[in-house]
Image (cartoon, rainbow, N blue to C red):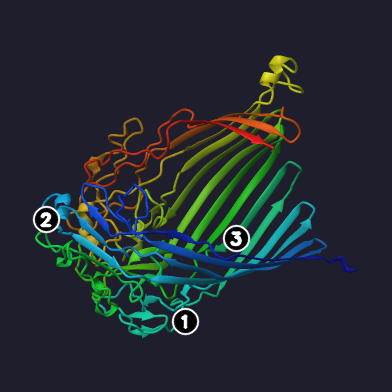
Amino acid sequence: MQDPFGLNTLADFGFQGVPDNSLYSGGIPRIAVSGRGGAQSNTTLSIGGVDNWGSPDFLPKFQHTNEYQWIDTFNISLSKHQIKVGVDARMPMRNIFLDVPALRGQMSFDGARTGIGLADFLVGYPQAAQLSNLAVSDARLWMLSEFAQDDWKILPKLTLNLGLRYDYATWPYSGADRMTNLLDPNPAATAATGVLFCSGTVVAPCSGKSTVGRTLVKPDKNNFAPRIGIAWHPSESWVVRSGYGRFYMLFERAGSEDQMYLNPPWLINNSVTAANTASTANNMRLDTGFNLSLNPATLNLTTIRLRAVNPNNVQPEVDQWSLGVERQMPWQTVLTAEYVGTKGTHLSILRNLNQQYFDAGGFPTGVIPYANLGAIEFRDNVGNSTYHGLELSAQKRFSHDFSLTAAYTWSHSIDQVQEHLISGSGSNSFLQNEHDLREQRGNSDFDFRQRLSFSYLYELPFGPGKHLVQQGPVSHILRGWRASGIAAFHKGRPFTIFSSNNNSIVQVRGGLTNALADCLGGGVLPSDQGTVDKWFDTSRFATPPGRLGTCGRNQDLRGPGMSDVDFALSRTFSYFGEGRSLEFRWETFNLLNTAYFGLPTNNVNSGSFGKITSLAGDPRVMQFALRFAF
C-alpha cells in the first residue's frame, strides 16, 4: 500500500499450530533382556555380571505436545527508513507426558551378599530397590515477543540498524496445579527446616500454598533487548560492519532436573539401599516383592531427591558484539576478518542446594542447609560466561570450475559448568562445592582454542566447453565429473581430574556431583611424549586426604585434537530423456583414516588413569550411491 506522501506499508500475518505429537514406549508385559529389543514393560532386574532383565529406566512412557504460534509483522518504507514491527506469540505450549523412573519397579543384585551378582539373584537378596507411582504431568508455557527495527540509510555508503525487542515467558506450570517447590531457598542456611509449597491444593509433604502464582516462580517482565548494527562501504572493495545485541533465553529445560511436576506428593520415587552386606534393601526379598510405600504422607524426605527452582529466577541473557572488515579480491574472492565477543549473565546452573558445608581447609563439617531434606537439584540463575574469538575466512565463488571456502577461528571460552545434557564431556554439570561458585570457573568444555576448516568443489576440465578433451569417446567418459571435499581440524578440548574415592564427602544426602583430585603440578607432557598409554603426567595428581580436591575445573590439561578429511566424486548422467537423470556418488569419510581419540581416563583412582581407551570418531567409511530422478 502506498499513500500520497510516499509511505509504503506491507503487513504479514500467520497462524500455525502443531496439534499433537505422540510418542509411546512400552507395551504388553514380557520378559525382556537389555539390548535385545522388544516391548520392555516388566520389573527391571539389574544383575551384576550379566545383562539386565526387564524394562530399562523410565518405561513405559508417553508424550503429547501442542504448540500454537501467532506471527504478525508490519513493514513500513519511508524515505531512507525501512521499518518493521511485529509480534510473535506462542500460547499455549503444552506437553502432557509420563516420564517416571521405576513405574514397574527396579531391583539390583550386585553380589554384596554372596560375592556374585547372579547368586544374590538366585537366593533373592536385592542390594537396592526403587519403585515409582503413576504420575502424569501436564506442562504448559506461554511466550510473547514484540519487536521493532529500523534500517536507516543515513548516507549512500552508511547504513544504521536500530532495534528493540521485548521477550516474556511464563515459567512452565502445571495445568492441573500439581507442582512443588522449595519455599525461600537459602544457600547459606544452616540445619534449617526446609518448607515445601504447592501450586494447588496443599497436600503433605507440602505445608504451604504458593504466593507467587501457579508457576511457583515470579514472572520476569523486564526483558528488553536492544540491537544496533552499522555497515559502512568506504569503497567498492571494502565493507566495515559492527554490531551489538542482547538475547534472552525464554525456555531452557535441564532434562528432568528442574521439572517441579516430578516432586512429591505428585511423583513418589522411593529408593532404598541395603544398610550392610548382611541385609537387603528395606529387608525385602525377591519372592515377597516390593514393600516400598508410595504414600506421600509417610515419606522420609531425607531419602528423596527434590527438584527446586529459585522462585526469583530471571531469564538467562547473552550480550554479543562484533567488529569485522570484508575485502573483495580478484578472482571473485572475498576475505573477511572479524572479532566476536559474547557475555552470558544469569545463566542457569544446577547445584545440590543441600550439600554439606566445608571449612576453610576443605574438610567437611557435617552441617547441611536443610536437616529434614535430602539432595535438592536446585536450578539457579547465577552462572556467567565469556567468549572472545578472532574469525578469519576466505570464500571464492564458483568460477573457472572451482569454488573454495576456508575458515579459521582462534578463540577462548570461559564458564562455570558444562551443559547438563552433554555426555562424555571433561567436567561436571554439578559443582564440587555447591557453596563456592568461584571454584568452578574455568575453560568451557567446548573451548577448542584453534579451528580450521575448508570445503571445495572442482569440476574436472573435460568435455564440451572445457579446456581439455572437448570431443570424442574419451570426452563422453570424462565429462561432468565433480570432486568435492570437506576438511576440519581443531585442537583438543580441556578436561578435569576427579577422585572417585573422595566422592563420599561431596555426595552426602545424595550424589549429583563428583569430587576433584589434588593437583601437585601441571601434568602437561610435551607434545612428542604424550601417548594413548600415558597422555599426561599422572604422578602430578593424588587423592585428597578426606577433604575437597585442589584441582581446578578444565585448567591446563587437554585431550587429543581432531583431523578429518572427507572426499566425494560424483557425476550426473542425462541420457534418459527430458526430466530424467542418474547421479552416481562415491563418498569417503575420514579419507586418511586418522584416529580421533577420546578423552583420557580422568579419575585418579581408576586403573586406566591417564590412558585413552576410546575413540571420538569413526574410522574410514566408504559408500557408493545411485540416484535416479524423474
- Horizontal placement of 232 versus 124: left or right? right
The quarter of the picture where residue 102 lies is bottom left
Q: Residue at x 75, y 18 (%)?
A: 470
User: Quick check: can you spot residue 314?
Assistant: yes
Q: Residue at x 36, y 65 (%)?
A: 100
Q: Position of residue 540 (x, y in %)?
A: 24, 43
Query: Can you identify the residue that label 3 sits on?
Result: 245
Structural crowding at the residue carrying mark 2, measured as other residues with C-alpha within 10 Å and reported as few (<14), some (14–19) or many (≥20):
many
Q: Position of residue 522 (x, y in %)?
A: 30, 43
Residue type highlighted by circle 3: Gly
What separation in Å lies between label 2 and label 1 (alpha carbons)?
A: 50 Å
Q: Residue at x 71, y 67 (%)?
A: 85
What separation in Å lies between label 3 and label 2 (alpha carbons)?
A: 61 Å
324, above or below 84, in the image: above
- Closest to the camera, between mark 3 and mark 1, is 1
Residue type highlighted by circle 2: Arg
Structural crowding at the residue carrying mark 1, measured as other residues with C-alpha within 10 Å and reported as few (<14), some (14–19) or many (≥20):
some
The quarter of the picture where residue 236 lies is top right
